[in-house]
Structure formats: structure tokens, C-alpha cells
Image (spheres, rainbow, N blue to C red):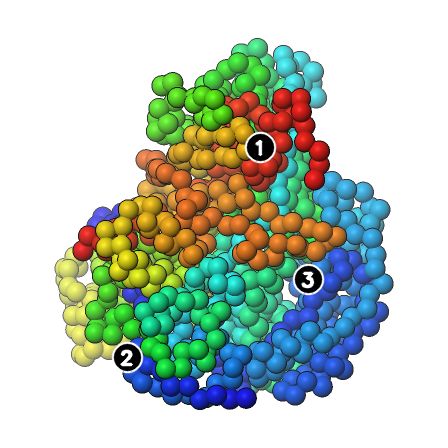
Amino acid sequence: MMRTINFTLNGQPVSTAIEPHRNLVELLQRFDLFGARESCGQGLCGCCTVLVDDMAVSGCLYFAVWVDGKSVTTVEHLDAEGSLSVVQQAFIDCGAFQCGFCTPGFVLMTHQLLKAYPNPSDDDIRHYLSGNLCRCAAYPEIIEAVKLAARR
Amino acid sequence: MNQVGRDIPRLEVRAKVTGRADYTHNLRLPGMLYGKVFRATVPHGRIRCIETGAARAVPGVQCVVTGEDIRKLIAEPYYGPAFHDQPILALDKVRHVGEPVAVVLASDPHVAEHAAQLIDAEYQELPAVYDEVAAMQPDIVVHDMLKPAGTFADLKHLKGRTGTNIALDFHLRRGDVDAALARAERVIEHTFKTQQCLHLAFEPFVAVADPGDGVLTIHTSNQTPSFVRTEIARLFGWPENRVRVKVPYLGGGFGAKVYVKLEALVSALALLVRRPVKIALTMEEQFYMITKHPTTFRIKSGVGKDGRVVARACEVYWNGGAYADIGPRVTQKSGFTAPGPYDIENINIDSYALYTNRTPAGALRGFGIPQLVWAYESHTDLIARELGIDPIDFRRKNILHQNRPQASGTPMTDAAIAKVLDAIAARLAWNKKLDRGSGTVRRGRGVAIGFKASISPTTSVAIVNVAADGSTTLYTSTVDMGQGSDTAFAQIAAEVLDFKAEDIRIVHPDTDVTPYDMGTLGSRSLFHMGNAVRLAAEDARAKLQALAAQAGLPEGTNYPPAEVFKKRFGMQAGNVIGAASFVPTYKSPDAQTGLSDNVTPFWMVGGAGAEVEVDTETGDVRVLRLVNAVDCGKPINPGVARTQLSGAAIMQLGFTLSEAMQLDAGQVTNASLADYKIPGIRDVPPMENELVEAEQHTGPFGAKGLGESGTFGVSPAIANAIHDAVGVRIMELPITAEVVFRALRAQQGRPLEDA
């Protein structure tokens, strides 16, 4: 049943044995990474967003074994150098979250958004982030944060 | 004053953007078992048998627990804040689809989930009642006997009552409504309804119980740690000090996570198996835990020639679902505000909490107020239209001014109702003509204002601990779920002690460490705990001054605390502990009239204005502009306050335009984010949020709560704007395109057939 997978996790090569039915969120929990959170379980809320080979995926729908040979980046890696990323700082400066449960997903998705659209319009932001939900509804502040991060 | 009123970022921002913030969701303990709940599939039925053999046989299953197993541990395993009506696991009967019937425990959550699907239960099905008005008749009775908790005086008369679904009837009588209606120039009556919807916090309900050795520890995503401790201790017949409740950050609460939810279940399971037990619900399961009351509100007003409302009769029916939860409190504590923020001489209120066979209903961001405002502000708009008076003028003519008695008889002190209305009218440029559109796209605008009494009487206790180097720690049982309470309290304590708010550390609720608080609910924390923190900090300041005197320092010298400690103790040693309780005065409503001249320590006021565009070919409603205004007194942190206002308004926008639990024979048919539509980033209209200039003189530095105030006016403002745009009146939430299109077709005399 167990399958051994090798992958890069936040810049470090790692190896583990895991059952094929486990998802990526469960895999990350084994490495004590809790920033990706399973919430809706259907890939609709974005709380479980993780970057796999620099592409955002829903960790709750992505089988753990699929990361074999790939590179996985989680929100915990963004301040690996000791300072917050521009996006993280912009989220703080704009008050772009309340409970914080969905925030890692929004932050990671915004990193990808700014790669695709360095100077995004409101429409670009709304379209790109429409797969992330925030029940505290910090959306106006999130849009401001994305624009602030783009300016910086 | 330099700490209060500052726009500092919340204290926990770094932990939240890095994904390292601590939630119960993350917690795993050594030896921990995962529980998966097996739930009722019928809305009302007697349990014939529960077949658990196949589940027990699954490799990796530790055990399967049913209500009868719980009864061996706890003779009376029923809990609830108002009624002891909810069994930890179903006993004898099930009363709603999704009610917990059994739990499978396993080390692997997937094993528990698989095994739970192998459980089979047989029920003798009973007829079910879903509608709140139908439940007034005792044809179908959800509970054989009422069991009020005994802590509330106004529930005592219900003890032991049989043959009824009425879990509380609240009545208020002021003046002579019948006579005033008979004399009135016009009498206008409407019935409004609201739907069942729910909180859907993104950290679904989760709790972990660790049986320990003599002390049970509960880690939980809960807004009321002190209540959980008291209630769990009561269930086990223990002193409170054998139960420890710890709450880290919450991934959303909104009123869902108040009182006992999963805590009794995980505690009983942990004690049965003597291992830590975690239960984490899925998003789907949240639809079977707690919801917002559906309501029917019949409202009748008598109006004089001068456009003054002379009498109002309110009948409100609250659909509480299968278990009372806090519904009876909603029925009374919000019920007495049912006539709206208007100065009306003659008032009758009849407010009923009803049991039905639906998922229980409790508190959701407003404690019943949004349902009431929906009705009275739609009604107010309709009266103004019928009288041909501008809706803002009509409101101004009838509004409650400073110190005038509200329906209950309590004066409206520090309630900036007129200012909130004026702020909305000004931002909408109400005096200017609106471009009303043409052809198939029509525009309109509407306003609505509402108010709320804070829940009373309640207690908050705070401790401020100044260490020997002067660094300070604050202990409270207030739960920070993103509303910014940690930061606000740090600002208040820092203001008193002349420290910097960012330097104060907050200890999160841990009932072994942090003192009592009634709960983080009803926008009560900033006022109640804020006052307790202010008093505790003043106590610490006085003790620091006393310490300075003991150290021989001349009075009035401004030595930093670290030097005072050093002088007094000869080294970096000692503590100064400031502590304080805050409990406002309160007078219970009179048993006969429902009146009281001191029913709340403060009033919340909120309102909204909306401009909408309606597509007459599709019924689609676009909100072009949403203006929100509240009286929050003097804000402690204006930036955080504005995000609270904005977030509340967007949440209410979901309850207005899209969110509704669909039921089929008691089963929720849209229990997922795919089918139950909450607002996303593309649904946010252009918004303006205003904190009107006001002061709560009894609040900490003039402040009061506002977490709910932004919800009050949104729904009726939009319905009023739709009426203004296309002349149809929507009487029931949510206002979907289909609802509007049906109303338009009915208006044209070409009604659509029912689906």
C-alpha cells in the first residue's frame, strides 16, 4: 500500500512513504506544515492552496503521491530568508484578513497572480482570486493589498 | 491619549500571513483518536436499533459509541445554554436530519470515516414539522417535555410543560395598541419571512479532549471557553477546576461557536476510551450543527395624519430547529427591539421561540436583529410609499432621539440613530435625483437603519500582569477570531499604563489561567471586557504607584516600572497584578408587561443605503453602491473597526442575495460550498463604510462593539431599492434573480407557474 515518494519541500529534498489515498494537505501535516488547510474539501475555497512546480493547486484534491519528483512550496517558505514577502507585508499593511484561516491561500495565489499580471487591474485581481473565498469578507482590503504589492 | 484611537495593525498579523497562527484545527496529541459521527437520516423518529457490528469489524477501529454508551457515563447527558434538551448522542429519538447518533473512533480518520458508513440505524418514523408558524400548533411535538436550564428566570414557567413546541413566549405591552389602531388614520399590515442560512466558518467545528489524570483538558474552536468549562463540569458533576478549556485563534466564529457544540461529545468519548479524542467536522457537516433562525414576522402599524406611527403590533415566530440552543434568548433579547428605532407610544410584541425538525438555530452575527430589521425596515418603506412621504423624511419624523424610551422603556442613551441615517442620506446624495435607467435596466435606491441591545447582564474579568522588567501581559478569556479584540485590549491597557500597545502580550483563553468571561458574542467584548481591562490596568497602575511609595520614591515621580521593581526588591524581581470584574447593572423585564428601564448597558446602531440596477428581463439585481454606517462610539482602532463594518455588510449581502439552505423532507440538499453560494471576491459591490462621530459614555474611552452592526440595514436597503427601481416588493429572503423575475411577472399579470 505504502509508496515512497521523493520531492523538494520548501527548497529541501525530502522522502517519505505514504498511502495513495492521502492528499497533499495530509502529507504536509506530516512535516508539521499547517498553513495549507482543508476547509471545504472540494477545491472551492482555496484555503489549501499549495504551489507544486510553481503552479497553485488545491491541496485537498491533489493526491500526495503526485508530488513525487516535483517541487512543493508552502506559505511557510515565503519568509525563509527571515523577512516577509512583499505580498505578505502588503496584506498586513492593508488589513487584508481577519480570522486568517484563508490567508495563506490568498497570499500564495497573489504571488502567482503578480507573476502573470505585474500591474493587475481590479478586474484581473477579481478574476484571478475568484477561486479563493474569505468568510470574513476581507475582499476590499485584499484587492488593495494586491495593488499595493504590485506597486512595491 | 495616544494608544487609543491609533490605527495599528492587529498584533497577530505576522503569524497569520505566514500560516503559523495557532488554530485547534492544527492540534494533534500523542495517542489521539479521531472520531467520525454517524448521523440521522430521518427528520423525526424513534430509534429502533443501531447496528454497529460491521463498523466495529473494520481493522483499525478502536470502538463505536452510541447514546446508550454515553448514558452509562453521564446519567442525564443533555446540554444547552437555555434548555437542557440536547443529548450528546441521540437517545430514544432523533429530531433532525444530521443529528449525531453514533461515533466511530480510530487512529486514522479515513478508517473512522469508512467505518461510519457501515453503521445502520432503524427508526420508527414520526411526522415532522418544519415551519415556525405551523409549529405553534401542538399537532406534531418535537420534545415530549420542556427542560429549561434553570439559570434564566423567564424560562422557569416552561419547566415540565408538555404538548408544545414553544420554547419561549415573550410578550411586551406598552400603551393601548388596540385603541390606538382604532383611532389611527391608516392601519398597514405586512408579513415578512427570512430563510435558513448559516455561518460556515472556514475552520469547521473542531474540538479535542484530553482525559488527563483528574483534570480534563478541552482544546476547542469555541467563542465561550468559560461557559464550556461550567457546562462540562455540570455534566460530569465535577467542580469547575477539574475542567480546563483552551482556545487559540479561531478560523471564524460569527456566533456559530458559542456555548457547547462538540465539546461534550469529545469529552465523553475521551473519558470512555481514556485517550485524547479529536472530532473535526467537514464543511458539509456544518449544515447540521447550527444555523440562523428562519422567521415569520407579522407587523401592523397605525399611522396618524401627520405621518407619525402611533401604534405597532409585532408577532415574531423564530424557527429554532430541533434544539433550543440560545434561541430563547434571541426571542426575548432581540424580540423587544422588533418595532424598530422609532418613537411609538403604543406597542405590542409577541415573540415565540419554536422547536421544529430542522437543524438547530442559534446566534448569527446580529442575534436575530437582521431578521427583525428586514421586516420593520421593509414595512417602514412601504408605509412611507403608501403615505407618499419620502422614506428618509418619514424615518426622521418617527425616529427615537437621545434619551427617549425605546419600546422596553429603556432610554436610548448614546445611540446615534439620526446621525447614522443622516450619514447614509448624505453619502447617497439623497437630495439629488438618481439616474433611473431606461428600457430593461432600471435603477433605484433605498435605505434602512436598525439597532440592537447588548445582551445583559453579563460579566467579564481581566488580569493585567506587570513583570519586573516592566513588560506586561494581559489575561482574558475573550476569543480573537479576527475581530481584533487582542489588539483593542492591548491599546486600552497601554493607554492606562502609558505603555506602547505593541509591547503588551495577550494570553489566549485557558480557563486554568485566564479569568471568567461570559463569551465572545453579541458585540459585547469591547464594551464589557474592554471596561474590565481598563479597570484592571487602573488597578495595576495604582499598585505600581504604591510600590513606588514603598520603595521610598517621592509621590508623583515618573519612574519606569522596571526601576520601581528594582528599587523595591533590590533586583529584577516581583510582579504587579491588576485585576477587575465588570458587570453592568440590569433590570429584568416585568413578567406582565415585558418592560424594563434598564434592559441593556449600551445600544448598537447600524444602517445601510443601496443603489441597485435591476434587469427586468432576467430579474438580476446588481448592487451599484452599498453605503454602510454605524455608531461604534469612539473607535479604539478605526482601521480594524472599518474592516469589521465592511465584512459584516458583505456577509449580510450573501444572506440577502444568495444564501439559503434548501430542504427536502428535512434533508439539506445544498450542503456544500458548491451549491450554497457565499459571497466571493467578484460579488463585492463598490462600498463606502462610515463610523459616525459618537461617544459611548460608559464604554472604555468612549467605545462600544460593532461586529454585528454592519449587518443590520443591508437586506431591507436592497429590497427597498429594488422596489424603487421596478415597483415590486420582495417579502422573503433571499432575493435571487428568480424571486425578482417572478415578482416582475406577477406585477405584469403574467405570473410564472411554480417550479
Give the letter of the chain under mark 1: B
Give the letter of the chain under mark 3: B
Give above or below for B30 relative to B439.
below
Question: Measured from the top left, where is residue B298 in percent x and y?
Answer: 67, 31
Q: Tell me the tag on residue B98.
A: 3
Q: Secondary structure at mark 3?
A: loop
Q: Quadrant of residue A14?
A: bottom left
Question: Measured from the top left, where is residue B673 in percent x and y?
Answer: 54, 56
Q: Amino acid at mark 3?
A: Gly
Do the residues at pointers 1 and 2 share their chain?
no
Residue beneath the point at 66% across and 82% down: B272
Give the letter of the chain under mark 2: A
In the figure, is residue B570 to the left or right of B271? left
Q: Nearer the viewer, mark 1 or mark 3?
A: 1
Q: Quadrant of the C terminus of chain B?
A: top right
Asked if residue B582 can be seen in this view, the reply is no
How many other residues sit within 10 Å of disc 3, few (<14), some (14-19) or many (≥20)?
many
Label 1 close to label 3 by CB (< 8 Å):
no
In the figure, is residue B689 to the left or right of B310? left
Q: CA distance from mark 1 to mark 3?
A: 32 Å
Do the residues at pointers 2 and 3 share their chain?
no
Question: Measured from the top left, where is residue A144 in percent x and y?
Answer: 29, 49
Give above or below for B722 relative to B209.
above
Q: Tell me the tag on residue A11.
A: 2
Nearer-the-camera pick, B670 or A96: B670
Q: CA distance from mark 1 to mark 2?
A: 54 Å
Residue beneath the point at 23% across and 55% down: A118
In the figure, is residue B718 to the left or right of B80? left
Q: Tell me the tag on residue B740.
A: 1
Give above or below for B132 relative to B28.
above
Residue beneath the point at 74% across and 81% down: B54
